[in-house]
Amino acid sequence: MQFGIFTVGDVTVDPTTGREPTEHERIKAMVAIALKAEEVGLDVFATGEHHNPPFVPSSPTTMLGYIAARTERLLLSTATTLITTNDPVKIAEDYAMLQHLSGGRVDLMMGRGNTGPVYPWFGKDIRAGIPLAIENYDLLHRLWREDVVDWKGKYRTPLQSFTSTPRPLDGVPPFVWHGSIRSPEIAEQAAYYGDGFFANHIFWPKEHTQRMIALYRQRYAHYGHGSADQAIVGLGGQVFMRRNSQDAVREFRPYFDNAPVYGHGPSLEEFTRETPLTVGSPQQVIDRTLGFREYVGDYQRQLFLMDHAGLPLKTVLEQLDLLGEEVVPVLRKEFDALRPAHVPAAPTHASLVAAAGGAKDSTVHAVDDVTGKAPEGATR
Amino acid sequence: MTRRTLAVISAGLSQPSSTRLLADQLAAATRDELVRRGSDVQLHVVDLREYAHDVVNNMLTGFAPAALREVIDTVTGADGIIAVTPIFSASYNGLFKSFFDVLDSESLIDRPVLIGATGGTARHSLALEHAVRPMFAYLRSVVVPTAVFAAPEDWADGTADGALRARILRAAGELADQIERRPPATGPADPFALTTDFLQMLGRGDGPPVS
């Protein structure tokens, strides 16, 4: 089982000091958080993608490329990559490049983005959110699997004899997750391709997650990728910990009460009851997280949101120490002991290469336009 | 015997509330009418006041807390709805509107609705027609022609055969008519149900591939 963190990259006032970090500070903090994730033994760092204040991560591959260069093992992912407003050709190129540079440590999570005004900034319309996600991903899927693509669709100019470069590292496309809170169409999309499905699982009642995962598993089996319990499931989670649970509640409450998304609404107590948010001791986080399995089945990836709502970097790093030292080792052991042998682990580049029968270079060598000949020694 | 459920919604804020009183009278009259015609009727009365915080939380977080979820499922799964609000500042009160704001906008399509209101003076009575009825028109519900407004004077000389009583009985009959024309409700719609399959979404359901 993989454990990691996902970040929205929000610039939010710390309600206890009134201080708002600069974009520069927040960007540097995100990097520090990612490096810390590797240091404390987490597996995954995933960044959001946003194109409007108060968010900084507009350029995920730039950030992940920088983090890749400064880490050794950490898997680099997204939460989410906007499959609606990004050109699928550019996604294919950017993430293939990142996969080469990181040595096979990249996967992606596709999402639609739910901020209406962003769509027209990129020439799109939020009312076509689902059809865009469907068409764009279908093209992306082909660009990583077919050396030369002829394509025509509704939302992008046609492609003729197009080769997306670089070709995927070792001839194997990055693994893809599809993230959604409550759109059954996206669970269906993930199931159709045999891709992973990630339920955001924060800010919402667990029943949403339970229903979406059940649908995904059922359709995954329907499309013949394996049995329902072999589908690849990821969950989000949100925690705040101190050794003494009362300290955790006292320290987190002002951040909760003023947080974007849910602040000034339900009480901390109501929200922890109604959603998977856990504020308390490491043991409480362990118990609650182990309980997720009871309503989604054995799953492959658990990401925690640790750094939003204006929490200062120092606090976030302390949280990651607790997560990495006290929580994840126990969860790893417990989850692994519970998982039956026929339920796979989350796919990685290495496992996908092995499944494909080994690494193969997939470079497409240029062909001379006039003679039609490839350079000597080159193969196609 | 056909089983029918009636959701009775009162947005009255005081206790006791004349809005609730009107809602109860409309509910009893509708129930009696449906029973007279051979149905078995179950009434679910909702005092929105008890869910006021939950409604606001739902607006802020995007999901209904468990107790409100139950109420929403009851209302959206009922055969008929009786919705009664006090008139504040020439319209429904904020609580009434907020409750309908947090419902899925397609969850009351073709649902028979009886609307009622109370106010401090009869001069507010047309608020039912210019505010409450259009809201249900947006929701594509079927609002019965008789809307019932109760002013203080209606309660003052409210005898068993008074004008208010006559309007209540007429409205209840109209609601019973609408309910009877429809098959029994099957409960709230499932928002997570998949209504399509992937090849259709991709545009390849009934024709050549897009590419």
Image (spheres, grey):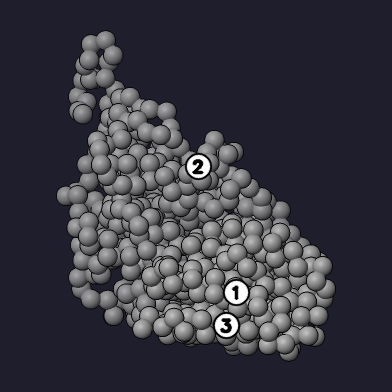
Mark 2 or 3, closer to the camera: 3
Specify which label sits upstream in the sequence, 3 or 1. 3
In the picture, residue A29 is in which quadrant? bottom right
Left or right of B136 in this view: A344: left
Query: Which kind of residue does numbered mark 1 sit on?
Result: Arg
In the picture, residue A268 is in which quadrant? bottom right
Residue at image location 57% in from the left, 76% down from the top: B172
Q: Tell me the distance, in whole angstroms, between the alpha carbons under discs 2 and 3.
A: 55 Å
**Same-subunit check for callouts 3 and 1:** yes
| Residue pointed to by mark 3 | B29
* Element type at mark 3: helix
Pinpoint the chain carrying mark 2.
Answer: A
Mark 3 or 1, closer to the camera: 1
Mark 3 is surrounded, within 10 Å at the Cα level, by few (under 14), some (14 to 19) or many (20 or more) other residues, namely: many
* Element type at mark 2: loop
* Element type at mark 1: helix
Query: Which kind of residue does numbered mark 2 sit on?
Result: Thr
- The one nearer the camera, B13 or A359, is B13
Pinpoint the chain carrying mark 1.
Answer: B
Q: Tell me the distance, in whole angstroms, between the alpha carbons under discs 2 and 1.
A: 55 Å
Left or right of A65 in this view: B117: right
- The one nearer the camera, A337 or A183, is A183
Residue at image location 27% in from the left, 15% down from the top: A368
| Residue pointed to by mark 1 | B170
Of the numbered discs in the image, which one, if any, rests on residue A304? none
Pinpoint the chain carrying mark 3.
Answer: B
| Residue pointed to by mark 2 | A85
